[in-house]
Amino acid sequence: MPVTESASETTRSPLVFPPGFVWGSATSSYQIEGATAVDGKTPSIWDVFTRKEGAVADGSNGDRACEHVERYADDVALMADLGLGAYRFSLAWSRVMPNGGSQVNPAGLDFYDRLIDSLLAEGITPMPTLYHWDLPQALEDKGGWVNRDTAAAFAEYTEAAVTRLGDRISTWTTLNEPFVSANHGYVTGEHAPGRTSMAEGMAASHHLNLAHGLSGERIRSIAPESRLAIVLNFTPVEPATDSEADRIETHHRNNLENRWYSDPIGGFGYPQDSAEHYEWDQSEVLEGDLDIISAPIDLLGINFYSRNIVSADDSYIAPPDTPRNTMGWEIHPPSLGRLLRDLHTRYSFPSFMITENGAAMPDEVREDGRIADDDRLDFIRAHVEQVHSAIEDGVPMEGYLVWSLFDNFEWAWGYGPRFGIVEVDFETQVRTPKKSAEWFSAVAKSNQVTFEEQDHG
């Protein structure tokens, strides 16, 4: 909508979203649950990885995290107060199947039973993700995602979870960000299990894709009324210059980081030239695998945080005034809008949802006892505006889930980065909604973004 340069935000018309548009938030099991050795749960790769010296920036772990297993009832009440319509969370595989195999742990599933029933009682749609990086250590000991058997074990785990919980779940998500699982866990070593092999990362990437396909078969069979989804992270890449070297490097990085999972799921197979570029012989791809992987899904979850500017020699230096969050990631909302349009153009997925979008910010300013995170508020609003613009252009967006509901354990960075719209005091476990939470609550309850008054007043 046109706005003159001199016009203030007070002159803008509201951004009204389609009826039924879903507003919610997201978390993951290891980052918030705590209770890592309760009711039969066994160690995941993250329980083991965090014990390695130097693996986590502040030497911390997820033993307590946000104590969500103990405090879930209060957390659900807080979500209801904020007016959230959906809550995306993940199941801890080793809580459900402690050895990763066929033995089901009823006590572990009891927790998710209680959580789901509490959400439904408050009118909040539960959106479970079956895998958010916390592989049972028992399976890692057998080769982890490099071992094809792990994909079959994931299908067994899916069956156990869906059989117990599926009568109340409308959408099942198989995997969260398999690129990160394979690349950060097996290539760079910065995430659990901490391996550093491109060949192992490539094998893991295929077995994760296969796990999604096999899991989808179980979901379709056991809960045919439920929708099938996967959540992928996308980091748009752009060349630093018009040089051939930069364009070639950008092409392969885009294939690896943005198409390695969506292309096979979308029916295109793996990007062949980039497979050759990364010296993957695809020996792990057996006959019939790509058919399993490309079975139709109902929803693509999109995680977006930033873009990357790529130079072949890594010489690109961003201008000093480039806006960034405390992770050092560039803040560039227009990249989200372009991404959504590109995905809609390239694939035939019937629906999209922003399943993670948010920012770690300094959280240093307080007003009236709360964090006055105007920077995070501005970040969320700018990206929500991009979603609205994409909807106007015909992209089938059905919801926006902010990352994250809580400050939490932020993987290899420990408890330093704060992504939450709700502050967590990790000593007392007191939750305090930040200014961004109050703003987001108003958006969720009204299904629109208004500009009737200055948000920073």
Image: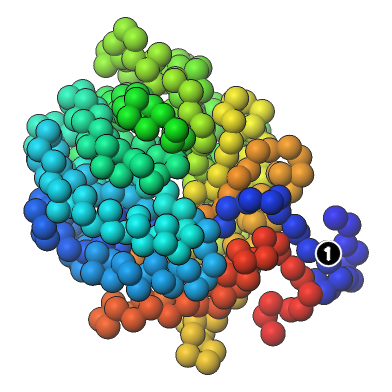
Point out residue 271 in the picture as x, y percentages from the top left corner.
Answer: 47, 19
Q: Is residue 177 left or right of residue 11?
A: left
Residue positioned 47% across, 90% down in the render: 369
The residue pinned by badge 1 equals 13
Res. 420 visible in picture: no
Residue 156 pos. (x, y %):
21, 31
**Of 87 and 308, the residue lying toward us:** 87
Q: Quadrant of residue 228?
A: top left
Q: Is residue 427 visible?
A: yes
Q: Position of residue 36 (x, y in %)?
A: 16, 59
In the image, taking residue 236 as reference, residue 289 lies left or right, namely left
Q: Residue 116: x and y, percent? A: 35, 55
| Secondary structure of residue under mark 1 | loop
Is residue 55 shown left or right of residue 399?
left
What's the amino acid at mark 1?
Ser
| Residue found farthest to the top | 287
Q: Tell me which residue sits at (37%, 32%) in the image.
A: 223
Q: Which quadrant of the figure contains the C terminus?
A: bottom right
